[in-house]
Image: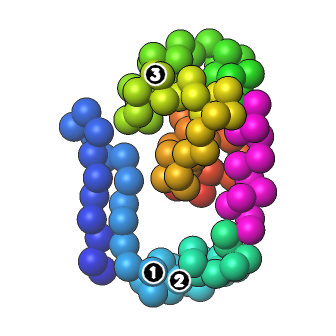
Amino acid sequence: MDIQIISRNGEPEYAVLPWDQYQALLNAAGQQQPPSPSSPVARAVAEQDLRPLADLRGLREAKGLAIEGLARTVGISPSYLELIEKGERQPDAAIRRSLAWELGVAGWRDES
């Protein structure tokens, strides 16, 4: 298997492998295979799972996170995050996924 290990703070955090090898592992475990990440179904599910980000400020405050800390973790400026929270900017998919991950939006934390 061609596996890439990604570490954070010196500890393994993710294992990345080719899609076909991932599908073979799912088959071996008797799991249903998810659709390809680029399929219309997968994109629709991803958009649906990110709807809770509509109340981004509420989610952030409920987690007790300062705007500066969340922005730093996601890799954007606090002023940009503030614009996103106010609805004045629409972040790209990568930023939305990072925000969802950091805020524990259902569907993203469990998949990775």
In the rendered view, tell whether residue 39 sits above or below residue 17.
Answer: below
Residue 89 in the image: x percent, y percent? Answer: 59, 39
- Judge left or right: residue 15 versus residue 96: left
Residue range of the region highlighted in magenta in the rendering: 44-55
- Judge left or right: residue 2 versus residue 39: left
Identified at 25% across, 33% down, the residue is 9
Which one is earlier in the sequence, the residue at label 3 or at label 2? 2
Q: Quadrant of residue 19?
A: bottom left
Return the residue nearer the eye: 41 or 111. Answer: 41
Sort mark 1 into few (<14), some (14-19) or many (20+) by Cα contacts within 10 Å: few
34 part of magenta stretch:
no
Q: Furthest-front residue in view? A: 88
Residue 108 in the image: x percent, y percent? Answer: 62, 50
Residue at the disc numbered 3: 78
Residue at the disc numbered 1: 19
Residue at the disc numbered 2: 23
Amino acid type at circle 1 is Trp
Residue 112 disc label: none
Q: Is residue 103 visible to us here?
A: no
Q: Nearer the viewer, mark 2 or mark 1?
A: 1
50 part of magenta stretch:
yes
Overall secondary structure of the magenta section: helix
Residue 75 in the image: x percent, y percent? Answer: 38, 35
Sort mark 3 into few (<14), some (14-19) or many (20+) by Cα contacts within 10 Å: some
Return the residue nearer the eye: 73 or 32. Answer: 73
- Do callouts 2 and 1 mark residues in contact (Cβ within 8 Å)? yes
Q: Nearer the viewer, mark 3 or mark 2?
A: 3
Sort mark 2 into few (<14), some (14-19) or many (20+) by Cα contacts within 10 Å: some
